[in-house]
Amino acid sequence: MSQSDNKKNLFHNHLLSGWSKIFGKNVEQSSEKTEVANTKKKPFPQNHFFSVEELSFLSINQKQHTLLERWALEMSLWAKERCNDTDKHNSKFFPAVQWQDGLLSTWINSKPCAEDLDQQADRLYQLQLAGYELSEAYIRMIDARSCRTLVGSLFIDNRKDNETSHNQNRYMRVKEVIDKAGEPLSLCVSFYDKISHHPSSEDYITYKKLKTLIDTKNFTVLSNEALHKWNEEATVRDDIEKKYLSLIGMVKRANHLQGMFPVNNSIYVNLGGKTYYPKAWSLYDNKIRIDFNLDTQQVQAYIIENDESYLFVDVLNYIEKTLNERTVTNDLASMVRTFGNAINENGEYVLLSVEKSLCSIDGKEINRVAVNTSNEVVASNTESNIVTPLTSSDKDTLLRSIVEYCDSLINEYKRVQSKSTDKIVKELLQAKLNIIYEGLSVYCKTTEKQPLDTLWQSVIKRFGIVPSPSSEAYSVHKESFKNPTDKPAVKVERPITVPLEASSPLITEQEKSNTDSSNSSMSSSKEAETSSKEESIFIPQGYIQVQPTPTGRWHTEEMQRREAYRIYGMLLSKKLKRQLDNGDNPWVSKLMMLPRDTEGKVYIGTNAIMLALWMEEKGFEVPFFITESELLDKGYGISEEAESLYILKEAGTERVYNISQTTFPINQRRAYESLKLNMVALERKKTSGYQFLDANDFSKIELKYDGTPGLSLYDHASKVIHIASKDKYENGDDYYRDLAVAMIESTRDIDFDTLCFDSYLFENLVSHLGSGIISQSCRFDATNPEYSKIWRERLENNPNYTKRILEQSETSSSQILQLSLS
């Protein structure tokens, strides 16, 4: 048995190094015997019981042993060493050994002990080499033993048809042995297209085929040292790839989609044996793109793929550090704005701890933290009035201290509120808690509304803070009840963390009325007026009376305007997706009638194109829209499934409904049908109005017809538009689309060649959307030949981005249209 222990890698070495190298000289000396045995095999050793007397005899006469006798004596001596002291020191005692059906077994202290499967296979293999005849079952046991020695081994796949991208090697690791009766002996193997612990695929391969691939050098095994290095490198690469994907998520969550590298060239990368110094990074199609210095001729930019992220460790570490610093700064600013007080009308807030300092930084006590609109954090002490500079580590310390302080504030507010009998104090505290709830809503990770306690527990858990008992809380901070103009003290409304329409760009009025019924408060006179009006107005089944948009702290004009731009962003994103699926889909079809109010006045600019996109999405036939206030005044009902859209006004916003969603088509059926026919006839009489765009007496920009269809350019330096002549376009609409895009660019007065990637995308969308607004008024189809996934991501997630895009597009397009409209 001890000999078998020394041959653990017997078959592994055999399979990888050749049959002649297993036993060294012993095998070479027996090679002649093996050749003879090829013609005449020795019979397999018969079953035999080696008694104590026989083993004692064999121990005296060792020179004449057969292979089986030598094994029996070795096993008996091995067992004797493990017997009790009496038997161990008895020179005439030898534990009996049994050879039964190819398996050796013995007894230790009267307990049977047999060799395991691998040891048995080792014995059988030696018999095979010695020229004994083995049954198919025994040969399969030997082959299975060979397979088991390969488990965990890693091979380089040298087959040419398995080359991977980036000229990387392909690897194969033996995972497990599949030894099922009646089926060929097989192995489950994992393939790796790169150095990684995550396999790219798994497969099954027969032992016979694997042996052939190894013998023909199609598979080359890695040595123990090489395997150790491979595993270490795979761990490093897997960690970096995981970090890369996490970094993409950080970039999106922080909405920080680009940045710059240090100007001192401290960050560099090696590509193709050459060193490059990146100057900027950006998010491009869910990947990190890096731009290099302009004096680098070989490569201007590079998009980092996930499987090669290990080549850019310094780049990724720097971006992560930048984002972490930005995240901590944003959290600091959020906490100060939520728990602090406004100190002026410029958006500056301050958080002050009167009883004790928040923390100590470089030996300086901090009890006052202020932030401005740019999220710049200023920490100081009210007594010394000295500002303390903050490092990244200092900001982490300060943030934890502020969260701990805020935890004590919440507990104290609730304690005082529950014990106070003063109505004014209770309302003040509730108003403060409502403001805190609204500010903390940015940390809510669920779509469902959470109580303040649940939300705050998730916040302190995020920052690793242990909640402080309310009994140990700080005393109520008197500063918290100042500035009553910003925080009403009498009327307390239920906080709403997410706008009513946040779950869907366009909600039904039924949903809005059901939800807002508990929020909106009306005076008794208005309720009476509405009640009497409902009694006198007939509302057919399936229709409801429109409810006014709620007003108050949670429905300010600013909030509603922001919600309008959020919905606009969703409409624009869906339009871009339809244009991507169908390249012939224009911004607004020239056959679509222009949106109008109930007096027939045409909407223009942002309202016009947004209503048009909404008409297209909902399939409205008549371009007449009625405002919420008109519905209330005229007493029209709306369908229970009716949806509304915001329009922008000089002061705030207002909801509008398509007239087909109201009771007008029912109560005034003939007028409605006549209106539809008259509108269609009126639109058919109109002709396209885009001819003025390239008229000599209109365009103030010189046109040079030296471009190519689909690509018009505005030369900022010479103030010239380069465009293909009209006869080179298959479709005249495409010519005026390109011309409108270039004319929009001319109004921007921006040199596109100097723009960074992010600014270029912004200006490009402004140009194309501006051409769509022009096409709506001038009645030509302006398609969108360009597309960027970043456009859709930002339109869907950033209302401020949508606002800027629409405002700039409307301003530029109005400059082009004002001459024609005059």
Image (tube, rainbow, N blue to C red):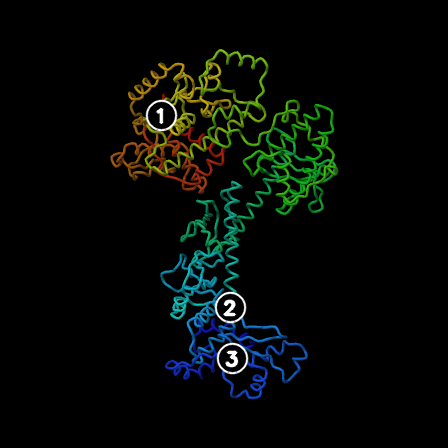
Residue lying at the far left of the rendered structure: 727
| 371 up-or-down from 317: above or below | above
Q: Which residue is mark 2?
A: 224
Say which amino acid is labelled 2.
Asn
Identify the mark nearer the N-term, 1 or 2. Answer: 2
Label 2: few (<14), some (14–19) or many (≥20) C-alpha neighbours in 10 Å:
few
Where's the C terminus, which quadrant? top left
Q: CA distance from mark 1 to mark 2?
A: 74 Å
Q: From mark 3 to mark 1, how far is it between C-alphas?
A: 105 Å
Q: Is residue 421 left or right of residue 209?
A: right
Q: For the residue labelled by badge 3, is the local secondary structure a helix, a strand or a loop?
A: strand
**Number of residues whose C-alpha sits closer than 10 Å to that of mark 1, classed few (under 14), some (14–19) or many (20 or more):** many
Q: Residue at x 53, y 82 (%)?
A: 70
Does residue 478 appear left or right of residue 679 in this picture? right
Q: Is residue 741 visible?
A: yes
Mark 1 = which residue?
A: 777
Q: CA distance from mark 2 to mark 3?
A: 41 Å
Mark 3 lies on residue? 48
Give the residue type at disc 3: His
Taking depth in this image into account, of 74 and 721 the one nearest to the observer is: 74
Residue shown at the point (48%, 65%) measured from the top left: 151
